[in-house]
Structures are given as structure tokens and as C-alpha cells.
Amino acid sequence: MTKERVYIFDTTLRDGEQAAGAGMTPDEKLEIARRLELLGVDIIEAGFAASSPGDFQAVQNIAREVRKPTIASLARAVPRDVDMAWEALKGAAQPRIHVFLSSSDIHIMHQLRKNREEVIEQAVAMVKRARGYCEDVEFSPMDATRTRPEYLYILLQAVIDAGATTVNIPDTVGYAIPEEFAALLRGIQENVANIHKARLSVHCHNDLGLAVANSLAAIKVGARQVEGCINGIGERAGNAALEEIILSLHTRRDFFGFTTGIDTTQIFRLSRLVSDITGMPVQPNKAIVGLNAFRHASGIHQDGVIKERTTYEIMDPRSIGWPGSALVLGKLSGRAGLRARLEDLGYKLTQEELDRVFEEFKLLADKKREVTDEDLEALMAEHRRATVETITYRLEHVQVSCGDHEIPTATVSLRGPEDRLYVDAATGNGPVDAVYKAINRIVGVPSKLVEFNIRSITETTEAVGDVTIRIEKDGKLYTGRGTSTDIIVASAKAYMNALNRLLAMQDVATQAKSG
């Protein structure tokens, strides 16, 4: 007997990006979208095309290049949004316009300032408009879990009659409790006469820590599309973590009885890519993809796992692409050993890429006696940041003079447009401040540093340091990350990463205006 399928809708590139400071460039979104395609998600919500030139370009690029999944763009229930969504999506092999409009009394009264009948008319008109562009239209009544059920039934029936092929029930503010959410889903199926004409979807937020639980409860009672983000990122406390939903369905097939089209071995690498690009670290105790998810500290647990893995592991770490036992590398390791370990970690490199990474590996190995998997992950993250197309300035050299009786002074060399070398120096309140001021003197783009975090990737005094920063310009946040055994160098790399993102987004906006 064929198992019923649950469709996986990823909104990391749209709702996930709404997490404070998690902005992505169009190139970075495309990179994540390609990995989502490898993961096997059914629908990728590539962005909100009408919200900014960068989002429009990202949706358009993904629609043209990522062919297997359905590509969706979010649109408010207004003509301009629907039209721009289609303009960005029209190159997609399988386009979807996702229209949303508030449905709860609190939103209708205080945000929309309309009456219920006007909201239904607006929703129907915009679903029809979207359906005029493509056959696949999703509608979301925003704040559905705080909407009067009787009104929600009427609204859903109207938009399905207008042509909506998916109706999504969002727990927009993370208000629902699983039993309550399941009851709402049952009520919809029992009271919306034409519900069989549309796929029922859910989109849960994590304000009470129940996003995954609500999503699974909804699947159990009839939802056949589930929406979420990799690593559970998103607005406020985040969205339902897709990897947790996927592995719950996979691990507890005996309970749910559903299948998905997901290649679970892609999860670990994708999780790390999203973390690197957004600058949002994965907490160590995070389910499925956290550093401690498959680590055992208790002697009793260690004894059990050694004798039989399933005594304390309900999932095989290899099923999500988690690296096996670590092969320690050092300065005597060759290209073959490096390539083998990187392939174990999920990285496939060309010979040219391997040669470039090997040079960086040797420099790191000279500073550390042992290079761990975590070090290699950081090395590959630096490699990715150094090879993206959006780089305007590249850090060449940093030199700092400081001490308790000296004024911190930094000299910085940057490689800029047309391969020109720029050198400048500055003083500051500390060595990092001096480096940033020297960089600002060269780049000439004023910004405000609003967040600065340092963490050690591994233990010991020779550990690689990972610096994450966020800078603000014109009310927008840009994230940067950098790694090095030297914290000052890591800080400079992080600042350059953030500035290059800022410059890339400015270029996108300028091109949109000139176009």
C-alpha cells in the first residue's frame, strides 16, 4: 500500500530572512535554494518579490535556475504585489503565487481597518488575479488561529471558489496549543464544503516553543503541506524547524504513516550553510543538527551506545549526513587525506578548489597541531565567503600595534575594484576599533556596528575563533562572519564580509532604479 505524502514547503529564504539581522544577498539565496533542491523540498518560497529590489532579483534568479521544486513568491493581497510576484516568477518551471491577507478581528480592526466582507472581497479578487497568471495559487489568512472559526470557514470557501489550490493555516503569532490547533484543522475539513479542491497547509511560529508540535498535530489530522525554515530561524522566536518535522515523520513512520520526498542526508550540510550565511549559530543542544545532538557524556549512555547504538540513539547520525568518526588531520596530511575528509563532511571540490583550500589548510595546520572537523567546517565557510560573486573588497593584510600604554593603531591593506590595492591606517579605542576605522577610511561607506560576538570553534589556546558581527546602515542590518586563529584577523574578515554584503545590496538597489 502506497503511503500518503506530506509536501515540504521551505520558507527559509522568505520568513527565515525576517529574523533580525539575517538578511541574505541574492547570490546567497540562490546558493541555499540549490541546496534545498538537493534536499528534495517540494516548494521553495524564494522571497517577497514586491518588498525590495534584492528580493525581486532573488526570486527571479531562483525561478530561472532551480527547476525541480515549485518556486513561490509571497504577495500581499494588493494588485502591485501580485503583479510583481508573477513578473519575478514567470521564468519558473513550476511557479506559485502565495497571497496573504489578515483574517482575525484584531488585525482587521487595527491594521486593515476594514470590515469582514471587504476582506473577503479583497482576498477573492487577488486570488483571481493571481490565478490569471498561473494555475498554482496559495492563500494564507494571516493570524488564522486567532480568527473566529465561522468566519475563517467562509473566507476559505470563498478563496477556493476563486481558484486557490492550497489554503494555508498560519499560526502567525505562535498562539496555538497542539490540541487546539488540531481541532481547528478538523473544523475546517468538516465545515468548508469545497476543502477537497485544495491542499491543506500549516505554517507555525514558535513564540511558545510549540511550532513543531503544532505542525505535527496538524499533519496527523489532515494537513498535507507543512511550512517551516531550516534551523527554525524566522520572525521573533522563529518558525517550525523543518529538519525536526522531517525527522519526526521519518523516525516515527510507525505513528504518522506518511512519506516525503526528502533526502535526509543533505540536512546537516544545509543546516551549516544556513547558519554561516545568516550569521545565526546553531545552539549546541538543538534537536537533530546541534553539536551535542549525537554526543554522549554520561558514562551509562556511553556504555550503552558502545554496546548497541540504538540504546540511546533513536536516529542514525549518518541519516542526516552527520560526519562519522573524526579523522584528525595535521601539517603532514596531504591533499588525498584532506579531500577524503572533506568528502565525508559533504564537500565536493574541483581540483582547482582543492588546491586553493589545501593552501589555506596548510597555513592553519602550521598554527594548530591537529585540525578537527569543526576547523574544516570553518575553513570551508571562509572558502565559500572568499569565492562568492558579491565581493567588492578583499582583505589582504592586517597589522596592529597595541598595549596597555600604547594607542591602538592598525594598518590595513584591501584589494578593491579593478584589482587595485588600497592601504590606510587608523587609531582606535582598541585594536578591533582601529582595524574597523582603517577599513572605513578605505571603503568610505559609513555604518554603525550594532553587534559583535566571538566564539571558539574548538577548545585550547590554539583554537580557531569565529567572529559574527552586524552593522547597520539606513535602518538595515548586514551580517558578517570571519574565522582565524587570530581574533583581530577574524574580526577584520567579519567586517569585510558585512561590508561586501552591504555594497552588494546597494548595487542591486541601484540597478533596479536605473532599470
Image (cartoon, rainbow, N blue to C red):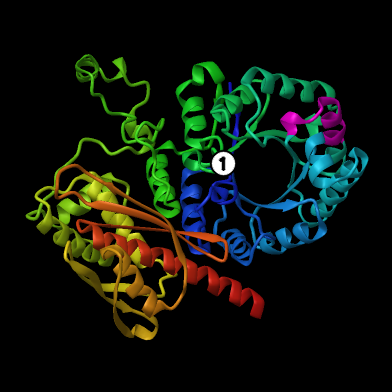
Q: Point out residue 345 in the picture as x, y percentages from the top left corner.
A: 29, 45
- Quadrant location, the N terminus: top right
Residue 147 as seen in the image, left or right of residue 278: right
Name the residue located 28 percent from the left edge and 50 percent from the top edge: 377
Can see residue 377?
A: yes
Residue 238 as seen in the image, left or right of residue 320: right
Q: Amino acid at mark 1?
A: Arg
Task: State which quadrant residue 116 falls in.
Answer: top right
Task: State which quadrant residue 444 falls in.
Answer: bottom left
Name the residue located 12 percent from the left edge and 47 percent from the top edge: 370
**Figure label count:** 1
Task: State which quadrant residue 513 falls in.
Answer: bottom right
Packing grade of label 1 (10 A; few <14, some 14-19, many >=20) is: some
Q: Nearer the viewer, residue 399 or 233?
A: 399
Residue 77 as seen in the image, left or right of residue 259: right
Question: The magenta stretch spans which residues?
Answer: 144-157
Name the residue located 40 percent from the left edge and 32 percent from the top edge: 288
Residue 28 as seen in the image, left or right of residue 190: left
Name the residue located 52 percent from the left edge and 30 percent from the top edge: 245
